[in-house]
Each structure stands twice: as structure tokens, then as C-alpha cells.
Amino acid sequence: MNTNDETGVKVIVRFRPQIGNELSYNPQSCIEITQNHVTVYPPGSISLTFTFDYILDPLSTQEQTYESGPKEIVESVMQGFNGTIFTYGQLDSGKSYTMFGEQSEPEFMGIIPRMIGTLFDWIDSEDEHVEFLIKVSFFELYMEKIFDLLNPLGNDLKLKNNKKGPYIESLREVYTTCDFDIHELIKVGLLNKSHRDSQNSTQAPYSHTVFSISVQQTTSEGACKIGKLYLVDLAGSEKISTCASPTLKQEQVSVSTSLNTLGSVISALTDKNIGFIPYRASKLTRILQESLGGNSKTALIINCSPSPLNVEETLNSLRFGTRVRSVRNYPVVNREYSLFDLKAQFVKKLENYHKMTHKISLLEEQLAKVNQERLSLRMYSIEDDSTKIPVDYTEIKQEIEEIKQRISEQEELKNQYEESIQASTLKIEELKIINEQQKIALQELESHSNMLDTELKEVEYSLESVLASVDLMNSEYQDDLTSIENMEKSLSKLQGEIEHGKCQLKCMTDMRSSVSKAAVEEQLRRRIKEEKEKNKSLKEDMKKIEYEIDLLLFKKFKDYMEADNLQVTGKKIFDIEMAIDKARMKYLEDERSMTLLQKNARTQMDALSKTLDKISKEYRNLTSKYSEIQLEKLIFQRKTLRLEEKCDKIAEDIARVDKRFMRIDKFNGNASQIGELGRLLQKANSVHSSLTARRLQYSINGGFS
Ligand SMILES: Nc1ncnc2c1ncn2[C@@H]1O[C@H](COP(=O)(O)OP(=O)(O)OP(=O)(O)O)[C@@H](O)[C@H]1O
């Protein structure tokens, strides 16, 4: 990590021109600016002078404002530092104008649109091998609730903590690659804000707006630095008005509480006697914890009115700015070392270690020499004693002292080297461990990458299978359509057959008197049976299709689940799903009409079987009548036979009488006998003629009269 010196929060004061009722109240300004000092002249009171890093007069341009400090912060972010730019001030003091300005007018663009320009200029000037990853988020803090301005559904988001610090759960972070996208995101965010404000009838000035952009740069060697910039348009600092509506009062209280917490955090940061910083007292200070007293380069822009009408609020804002100026921050470059960097460091340390080892061995050699000299000197002094040669001891003593001195110096040096060797060895060990850890991490990354490769292949494979199954589903769908069409055809055929059956039945009913009833009944029964069988097979077909459709739906669902992340197939699957739904609807419709047809067919069948029953009943009646008639006919035939026998007998009698008449005629019989016989003949003739007439009548009627 790159450690930089501590740095103060840069405070810039910007006075806007007088507007609205300020001009009608008193167009005179109550401030005087000389370089970085501003003197405020409250009406009827003593003047007060404040000093800031930069003071912008009412005629200052948007560009001057940006150049006065914000640009430097943006550039620091590009170097890997965290950065924060706040705008603070009373209502209508020009905070939003300073932060956003007029996006469509280059001259009037505020800090955020200008920041985008600096960012992309920097990216363009960088080495083409450096990879940039830009993330944008935009949210609003209203009454201690967080609303995502890039996601209209992101309401009341939770603020949580992880190892890196506080973060907003489910906040939409949009990855962007060009300046146009960021401009569009700002427009969308501001539109969502005004829409939300109008929907909830909330007051925009009583919310804090936070735009955040994070820039990650990765070199081709894998070294990475991340800079995060917060651009905060704070809610208007204003006293709670006593005559405000309850909602307005609530909003004012909420803003005032969070701004007071901001003030308390600043006071705690600047007062050495206070150890505890109340960051957690509000969501605003929790989110911006690093921006005040932490790892961030921060600039605060105090927006003020120069009008005597707002002098009190102006003084409050300037006092706040003065306090913030003494807050110290400790920014560092957020760097992550690459394996390449770590290896270079290790090699350097190893070289130092080798140099030191060499030096130590040299020193050890020197020490050995000195020891040798000391030994020889001792020997010399002993020999000296034995031969009793007068020696100048003072010189020798001095030499010995010098040698002793050199020895102790060398030993001290040796100890020092040993200590530094030990420290280096420890460092080397540490580096070795780090290296090992990096190696493991690299291996993990490699295995992870392999896993990802396999997963990718699997995904590709499943994509292919999804596509294949999509084709299959298409063809199956076509098959289904064909079978539904076939079903429709067979249904219409069935209908035709039913119609035909009806006609036949009618004909049969008409012909019932001339055609055999048993044959008709048999034919009808056969027809009904056939129709029932057809109906049964149709039902089975329908069940099969229903099962197949369920199977397809299940398959489709499964495929859909598999292809969930495959956005490419998503649409295709959606289309297929729609087609299947359509087919299902059609099938349901067909099923409905089939059911209707079945119902009709059943009704007709019922009617037919009723008619059949009626016909059968009639037939049975007729058959019994027929047998009765047959019996009658038999009786009548017998009677006729008997009568014929009688007739024959009478005819014989007549013939006999005729013969007697002839004999009488022949023998001139008496007249009375002749008269009686004549009467008998007349009677027999009349009986004979009536019998003949009845016989004739009977044969005409065929025995069915
Ligand atoms: N430096 C300036 N030059 C010209 N006009 C300005 C300047 N600053 C602010 N204004 C104008 O003053 C008015 C109030 O400004 P702005 O809305 O930015 O204030 P604010 O502090 O954001 O208000 P609020 O607290 O209500 O959000 C706007 O009409 C704006 O155009």
C-alpha cells in the first residue's frame, strides 16, 4: 500500500448571485472577498472574517468552481485514492447548481458532468494495456431511508457492514464503458428522483443525493488500484420552521438530525479530547465514514448567499466550513499487489541477504586474523618472560588495546549484521509465506478458471442441447398441430357420420314398416358400438396429446431452468413458451369443442337410442300383434276349411238334389216335393254365395284385415 501524508479537508466557499426576493429585499451584498478570506457584514453587528482554501465570488463560473478543488480530487481517484466532494448550504444556496448544473449546456455543467470528462480524458491518456472497470450508483437518503435512483423498485434499502466497511444491500451498480452512458444514468437518476418526489409528495431539498463512481485499473501484470468517488449533494441546512406542516416539520427534523450528526462527527474528529467518533449515529455519516477522518481526499463546497436577507444562514455555513477545515484525513492508494510485484520485492530482498552474508564472512575472516594475532602476541610475551629480554610493554599494551577495540567494534558490527540478517531472514520467510500464499491463490485461480472453463463448456453444451431440444420441441409442436388437425378432421368425419347415421335412422324409421325391424336394430347397435369405439380411441388420443404436451411443458421448463443464465436462448425459449402456450390454448379450445361435439354426439346417441327403444317397443308390439293376427288367420283358415267342407257337402247335396230333380222331371214327380226342393236349393245357393264372398274378402286382405 502506498501511504501518503495526512491531509486536511479542502474547503471551498462559493457565493451565488442574488436571486428572487433577495434582490427586492436589499440588492446590496453583505460580503467582501479578498483572496481566500471573506468578511461578512451582518446588518447592525460586527463583521466576521473567515479563511478558506478557496473562495468563489458570485460571478465565478462553473469551470472555475471545478478547477478550484474538485478536479484535483477526481484526478486523485484516478490514481487509486478514495475521494469525496460535498456541497453544503442553506436551501436555494446553489448546491445542486454546483453539483449537477445544466447537463445540456457545456458552459453551465456542474461538477459531476465535468468529472466524467476528466475521467475519460485520463483513460484516453493511459497505456492501452491498462484495463478500466467503471461502476456507477446513484441513491437518495430521505428521512433515514435509502432509495435507489437507478432502480425505481429499490426502496428503503438496508445499510450493512462487511469486511471492507459499510455497504448498501441490493443497490444497483451499473458498469459503464463510455461517458454518454454516465450522462444518461445521471438523467435517469434525476428523473427517478423527481418522479419519486412527486409521487410521494416529498420535498426534494430535504433529501441528500449521493452519486458514486468507482474506477478500477488493472495493468497487464495484474497490479490493480481502485479509486472510489462520492459526490454528495447534501440537503439544505435550515432551521426548523415553526409554522411548517407536520410532514415538512418531520422532514426538516430528519435533515437537521443527520446534518447535526455530520457536525458532531466533525467536532469529534477535530477535538483531540474526544476519542469516540459517532459515525453510526446516522446513515449519512455511516456511508461517508471514510470521507471524514478516514481513507479519502475530501473537498467541501460551502454554498452561500451574499444577501443580507440570509446573513445568519451564511454565517452558520461558514462556521461549519471552518470546523471541517481542521479535519485530518489519511488517504492511501488502494492498491492490490500483483504476483509480479511480490516476486520483484522478494528478489531484491534475496540480493540484500546475499550481500550481507558475504560481508559477514569477510568480517569473520578478519576476526579470525585478529584472533590469530592475539594468540601470537601472547606466545611472544611468554617467550619474552623466559629469555628475560627487556620489552617496551607500553607499546604492546597500546597495540593490544587497539586490537581489543577493533575486536569489540567488529563484534558489535557482527552482532548488528547478525540482527539484520535475522530480520532479513524473517522478512524472507514472511515473503516466502506470502509467495506460497500467492502461489496457492494462483493455483486456486487456475483451478477456478479451469472450473469456469468446464462450466463454460457445460453451459455451451447445455446451450446446444437447449437449442436441439428447442428444435425438437418445434418439430414436436408441429406434430402436435398435425395431430390436432387430424383430430379435427376425424371429428368432422365423425360429425358427418353422425349426420349420416341420423339420416339413416330417419330412413329406417320411415321404412320401418317395409324393412325387417331386427336388421335395423342390429345395424343401429353396430353403428352405436362403432361410434363408441371411435369416441374411445379419440379420447385416448386426446389423453396422449395432453400427456405429451405436459411432457413438453416439463421439458421446456427444465430447459428453461437450465438456460436461465443464457440470455441468448432466453428470448427463443420465451417465444417457444408463447408458442406452446398458444398450442395449449388451441388444444384447450379444441378439447372444449371436442367435448361439445362429444356432448352433442352423446345427446344425439341418447336420442337415437331412445328412438331405437321406441322403435323396438313398437316392433315388439307389432310382433305380438303379428302373432295374434297369425293365430286369427289360422283359426280363420280352419273355419274357412270347415266352411268349404260344408260348402262341398252342400254342393254334393245340391248335386244329389239336382239328380233327384232330374229323376222327378224324368218321372213327373209331385208338385209339392218339387216346391220344397226348390226352396232348399235357393237356401243352399245363398249360403254358398255368402261363403264365397267372405273367402274372396279374406284372400284380398292377405289375412291382415
Ligand atoms: N452560481 C450561480 N450562478 C447563477 N445561478 C445560480 C448559481 N447558484 C445557484 N443559482 C440559481 O439559484 C437557484 C437555487 O439553486 P439550487 O437549486 O442549485 O440550490 P440548492 O441549494 O440546491 O437548493 P435546494 O436546497 O432547494 O436543493 C437556482 O435557480 C439556480 O439556477
Image (cartoon, rainbow, N blue to C red):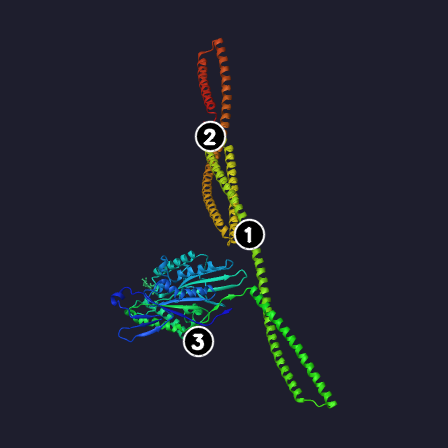
The image quadrant that residue 676 belongs to is top left
Q: CA distance from mark 1 to mark 3?
A: 55 Å
**How crowded is the residue under tag 1: few (<14 C-alpha within 10 Å), some, or many (20+)?**
few
Residue bearing the label numbered 2: 513
Residue bearing the label numbered 1: 460
Q: CA distance from mark 1 to mark 2?
A: 78 Å
Q: Secondary structure at mark 2?
A: helix
Q: Earlier in the sequence, mark 1 or mark 3?
A: 3
Relative to 585, is 666 above or below?
above
Q: Amino acid at mark 1?
A: Glu
Question: Relative to residue 462, is residue 153 drawn left or right?
Answer: left
Q: Nearer the viewer, residue 22 or 129?
A: 129
Seen at 52% across and 58% down, the residue is 129
**How crowded is the residue under tag 2: few (<14 C-alpha within 10 Å), some, or many (20+)?**
few
Relative to 25, is 583 above or below?
above
Q: CA distance from mark 2 to mark 3?
A: 116 Å
Q: Residue 139: where, in percent of width, then height?
A: 41, 62
Give the total number of marks visible in the rendering.
3
Q: Quadrant of ligand 1?
A: bottom left
Q: Earlier in the sequence, mark 2 or mark 3?
A: 3
* Quadrant where the C terminus is found in the figure: top left
**Label 2 close to label 3 by CB (< 8 Å):** no
Observer-side mark, 1 or 2, equals: 1
Observer-side mark, 2 or 3, equals: 3
Residue bearing the label numbered 3: 276
Observer-side mark, 1 or 3, equals: 3
Q: Residue 265: where, in percent of width, then height?
A: 41, 73
Q: Residue 316: where, in percent of width, then height?
A: 33, 72
